Amino acid sequence: MTATHLHFDTALLPGGWAANVQIRIGGGVIREVASGVEPAPGAERHKIGLPGMPNLHSHAFQRGFAGLGERRAEARDDFWSWREIMYRFVDRISPDDLEAIAALAFMEMVESGFTHVGEFHYLHRAPDGAFYDDPATMAGRIAAAAEISGIGLTLLPVFYAHSGFGGAPPHASQRRFISTPDEFAKLVEGSTVAVAGLTNSRVGIAPHSLRAVTGSELTEILSLARTSPVHIHVAEQMREVEACKAWCGKTPVAWLMENAPVDSRWCLVHATHTNEAELGAIVVSGAVVGLCPVTEANLGDGIFPLRKFLEHSGRIGIGSDSNVYIGVADELRLLEYAQRLSGQVRNVAALATASTGRALFDAAMAGGAQALGIKSGLDVGSAADIMALDAGHAALSCRSGDALLDSYVFAGSGGIIGDVWRGGEKLVSNGRHLRKDGIIARYRKTLGRLLSS
């Protein structure tokens, strides 16, 4: 069901909260926004309107083993031992399986208020390491999952060639990810074809990390990006930082800022272990730091120095990464709470505003849109990606203005999101995705086979 007019008693516009807001939609885009007006005839009425949130970093297939890595595997269990579990799971996934798992992950994103996702997609080859007849077969299944769920998609095919700094040969367990620069060019071309039929979707590129790409390869593949988004994992783990220093004498962020044309198209995913000089260099470049607090906590990555970065006017966005748990408010809440725990202070993200929820929401909205190459917000020309909070939820009682966002982020619980539209199409009604039953049935069948094999 596609809306033409939505009316909200209150809505968060680019200039702040406004009352009696009417949004006119055409062709999936916001054509007009008016405040202080009565509902147009036939307008769909709601209480509280927010723009949908961009999710700048996802590995959709990892949703399939969420919760299965919570048993100690070694004397020291960390990101690297978790990665071995991921490798074993990924060995089994067929194109049909990927589509089913990604459709579930994307559906859950939409239910939580994420309306556009940056899919950092590195599962390219068949289980035996050979390319499919169409090298972009798996990318096509990601696009199909986006169509099923309705989410907007920035597809980020990943270049992955090595197991460590300095061009170390890949491990056998990485055989499904690997490509040469020429093969990667075909993947990017095929990915562009795969998303061509989707609305408000695009293709960028993603050099996986400095562990997985050499300097010369990075230069070569960047020519494919032109004006498109460029995403890269960087400085997620201290072991990665130390290995980079052993290789070149510099940290990953320092090497990247000195040797790559990092600018506002770039998203540096995690950047967890970053010093103040490096933070300043990121700010000057205009790049976005992609933070994934739930995954970073789950994997024991560490805590990004958020306050220092925000004080320098740094740009951030949020992502669901491993998709162990999916939720807009959950990512924002944990981002703030980690800062409170490490610094033993409160309301860390609230610099220029008294409202922490508003500060987090605005920053993640702007940074996520920049990183994914989209226009966001309840504004003319933006995609009609909108969520309505359930004004009857107890956490929102007697709230208005920024207190609504503070309560949504820090005091809300299940059911606080009522309806979600993407490109003007209602995908979630009363908290439930309209295609949920079929998506879950297919997912259960897929997981039943994958986990029993």
Image (spheres, rainbow, N blue to C red):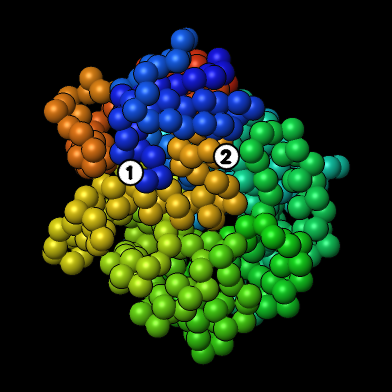
Residue 109 in sight in this render: no
Identity of the residue furthest to the top in this view = 42
Q: Position of residue 289 (x, y in %)?
A: 45, 63
Viewer-proximal residue among 184 and 374: 374
Viewer-proximal residue among 268 and 324: 268
> Which quadrant would the N terminus be assigned to in this image?
top right
Left or right of 337 on screen, residue 435? right
Residue at the (51%, 50%) spot, across then down: 369
Which residue is tagged 1?
A: 16
Viewer-proximal residue among 382 and 33: 33
Query: Would you place residue 427 above or below residue 378 in this image?
Result: above
Residue at the (76%, 45%) spot, across then down: 192
Query: Would you place residue 255 above or below residue 366 in this image?
Result: below
Task: Give residue 381's mark.
Answer: 2
Q: Earlier in the sequence, mark 2 or mark 1?
A: 1
Residue at the (56%, 77%) spot, across then down: 256
**Gap in Å between the C-alphas at discs 2 and 1?**
18 Å
Q: Residues within 10 Å of mark 2 (few under 14, many from 20)?
A: some
Identity of the residue furthest to the front in this view = 37
The kind of residue on which mark 2 rests is Gly
Identity of the residue furthest to the right in this view = 133
The kind of residue on which mark 1 rests is Gly
The count of marks equals 2
Q: Position of residue 267 (x, y in %)?
A: 53, 61
Query: Would you place residue 56 above or below residue 144 in this image?
Result: below
Element type at marker 2?
Answer: loop
* Displayed quadrant of residue 409: top left
